[in-house]
Image (cartoon, rainbow, N blue to C red):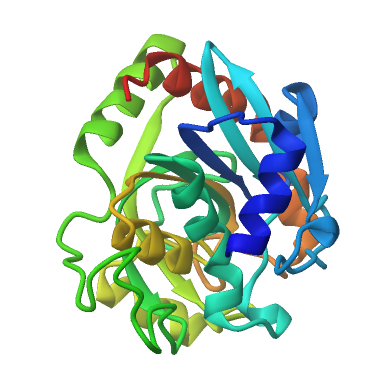
Amino acid sequence: MKETLEFINKKINNFKPEIALILGSGLGELADEYCDIAIPYSDIPNFIKSTVKGHKGRLVFAQISGKKVVMMQGRNHFYEGHTMQEITYPIKVFKKLGVNTIILTNAAGAVNETFQPADLMLITDHINRMGSNPLIGPNDENFGERFPDMSEVYNKSLISLAEKCGEELGIDLKKGVYLANSGPSYETPAEIRMMKLMGADAVGMSTVPEAIVANYCKMNILGISCISNSASGVGNSTVLSHEEVIDVTNKAKLKFKSLILKVIENLHN
């Protein structure tokens, strides 16, 4: 951690980010538009490279609406073969850099039949079906306690703020529970029926590990899913593909970006 922080701090000249933003599939364009300093993950000691198509794999620092922001332009996933600790390491780095608010984004499949592709869903809670937890192993009291409370992972005030921003922008925001599987295979129709019974509204392969560690580090968390498709067996769902996910998130990215920018503008840290 010391080695990582020393390297980043040399590159950013005491830039102190207060907000972190993790950009999921098809959503990395925001970091291209707002980029003061960009550092490839491959250059950062102890970071892992992003291997997913559509993820640039850079840490981008920028001023947005007078706020200092650090963005992950692409994330790492459990299904790439990394450990839970490796994929959530950047969250601990952000904590040490001074971040206290984090916005987690992803592309997700709709389990809720009322959701349509290109809808945006504010995450109110999550279900971890990834088969692991990033806090397994020795605990570091410098970051958080051994048994962190999970009763309000996604900050209610931030959800209310996002709803207000959505209203002002004329965006019909959905709200719901995000369920994370390990992937990389998509779910079967039978699995989706089970998830519906569990109370899931959307399903994906990310976000939950980062949310667990950010909550553990006492950060304020806002989660937003871009609904990229109907999950297997839901409504008129067709054969699922990563290309479809990127295509739909590209269609939704204008309203997605406008919402994120509006939220950042109205954040009071």
| Left or right of 49 in this view: 261 | left
Residue 25 x, y percent position in the rendering: 69, 52
Residue displayed at 53% across by 79% down: 84
Q: Judge whether residue 25 can be spotted in this image.
A: no
Can residue 69 be seen at all in this image of the molecule?
yes
In the depicted structure, whether residue 231 falls above or below residue 79: above
Query: In the image, 27: left or right of 132?
Result: right
Towards the viewer: 204 or 97? 97
State whether residue 210 is above or below residue 100: below
The residue at 71%/34% (across/down) is 12
Residue 254, percent across and down?
66, 24
Figure quadrant of residue 134: bottom left
Q: Foreground: 152 or 5? A: 5
Q: Nearer the viewer, residue 91 or 11?
A: 11
Which residue is at a point 76% across and 26% down the rendered structure image? 35
Q: How many marks?
A: 0
Q: Quadrant of the N terminus?
A: bottom right
